[in-house]
Structure formats: C-alpha cells, structure tokens
Amino acid sequence: MSLERLTLPATSLAFAAALAVSGAHAQAVPGCGGRSAGPAEAARVVDGRSFLLADGREVRLAAIETVLPVPGDQDEARAEAAQAVKAALEALVLAREVDLFVADAGFDRYGRLTAYVSAGDGVLVQYALVASGHALVSPAVLPACRTWLQSAERTARARGRGLWGEPYSVVRNAADPADILADQGRFAVVQGKVASVRESSGIIYINFGQRWSDQFTATLLKRNEGSFTHAGVMPKSLAGRTVEVRGWIEERNGPTVELTRPEQIDIVH
C-alpha cells in the first residue's frame, strides 16, 4: 500500500462506506451506554481522538485509541499517519453540530469530556473512525459496545484500511523490541509467540523472548489473574502460543505492556 492511503483524499472513500454502514445506528450508541449531553458545535480538532467545542470544552472520544502526533517525530510514516487520522476526524465533526453522549468516566485526568459522539447526520464518530481504519478499539469498553466496534475493526484490518496497511501498521512484531520501543508512550498492538511465563513478587511476566530482560514482555498483577481466567484467558498456559497484546508501550528493561483487562490479549493460535 502506498503512503497516499493514509491521506485525506484516500480516506474520503473509506468514510463513505463507513458512514453508509453506521447510518442505521443514527439515534443510538449500541451497547455503549452514555448519557445524552445534548447538541454542541465542534470548532477545532486537536488530534485524532479529541476536539474542542465552540464553548471551549474539549471532548475526548471514548472507546478508541489511535496514532497521536509527537513533536519532532522522525518516523515519517507515523507522523503522516497521525496527520491523516486528525484529518479523518476533521472530516466527520469540524464546524458542525454534534450530539454528545457522556461515557461513565465523565472526565479524564486532563479534564476532557469523555464521550461518544454522533455527527449531525447521525453517524457515530467512533464507529466511522474504526471502520475506516483510523482508530483501534480500546479494551476498556462495555462488552456489547466492544463487540460492535471490533467487528468494524476486523473488517478494516482484513482490507488493509488506514492504520492497518502499509507503510504504517499498528501491529508490531514481538521479536523486534527496537521497533516496539519506537512506539513508547503510544497505544499499539504487538503480536508474537510467547516464550515463557514466570511469576515473581506478585507479578506474572509473559515473556516473548529468551532474553526477557530486554525483549518484549506483558505483565499483570497476580491478584488480577482470576479475572483473566474467568474470561477464558489463562496467562500461565500461554507459553508456546501466538498471541496479540494491545496496550500502552512502556520501557522497563525492554518494551512492556501492562495488562489490566483480559480483552488486551487475543490468542491467534
């Protein structure tokens, strides 16, 4: 796929398809919850997941994560992807009236209103972004909502739309810690074969390499293991399995993702 697939002209066709599909859900947020906060005017898009209202409030889109711009980013594909995602959100909300449905969280730690957003034509903005490949589904979403959005994500991924295609792909190779660390501080998907699972000092370490001290590792607190097992994900049985982990990339003697929810792990085979 060429870089042009991540620019605004190319996203317009993807949006047309996404809008047509999501139009049936015009007056509701299927299974996602949220209380109506009424209409408001979107005045300026900050990045691919947040925008300012005409009254000065900032809205952070609930249920999704995406590529965010970082000043001075030397990765051209990533920087252009972040710009394309921002342009995608602008095409959906800029200078138009939107309907807000405030998520249970209300406000995030930065004081932004966390909400589901319906565009003036009744399109759920989160769905349109996911369906066009410009956003990923966050694990921290109500089950019915997550299932609905994940269906759109799977289709976007299968068709190589937006962030799922080349030259930028959100899927990182667990065997390449340097590539993963390039996304430090960002939300990403990492795929690889689990080499071993260890427990120490109340933490379960899911290791993706023999040199666990500098290769990719996913961690979870031992006290949270029960919630994973209840969801059908048994951390200590993952050795030898190929899995995908989604979450925020941190650096702790190598790239790490902290697991707090079983939805962060998908068993590939």
Image: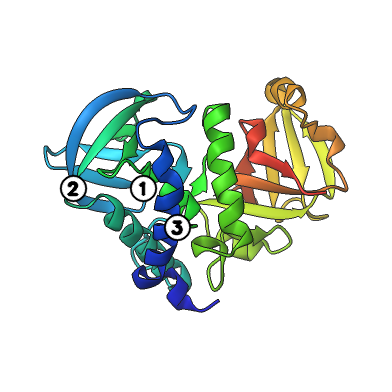
**Residue 92 in the figure: left or right of residue 258:** left
Disc 3 vs disc 2: which is toward the camera?
3
Q: Residues within 10 Å of mark 3 (few under 14, many from 20)?
A: few
Query: Looking at numbered disc 2 in the image, what kind of residue is underneath it?
Result: Arg
Q: Which residue is mark 2?
A: 96
Query: Looking at numbered disc 3 in the image, what kind of residue is underneath it?
Result: Ala
Image quarter of residue 29: top left
Residue in the picture at 25% in, 52% down:
45
Query: Looking at numbered disc 1 in the image, what kind of residue is underneath it?
Result: Arg
Q: Could you say whether the residue bearing mark 3 is in a helix, strand or loop?
A: helix
**Residue 40 in the figure: left or right of residue 27:** left
- Which mark is drawn over residue 49? 1
Label 3 and label 2: CA atoms lie apart by: 20 Å
Tell me where residue 239 appears, x and y as whole percent: 86, 44
Q: Which residue is mark 3?
A: 17
Q: Residues within 10 Å of mark 1 (few under 14, many from 20)?
A: many
Residue in the picture at 37% in, 60% down:
70
Tell me where residue 179 appears, x and y as whole percent: 61, 65
Q: Could you say whether the residue bearing mark 1 is in a helix, strand or loop?
A: loop
204 lies above or below 267: above
252 lies above or below 236: below
First in sequence: mark 3 vs mark 1? 3
Q: Residues within 10 Å of mark 2 (few under 14, many from 20)?
A: some
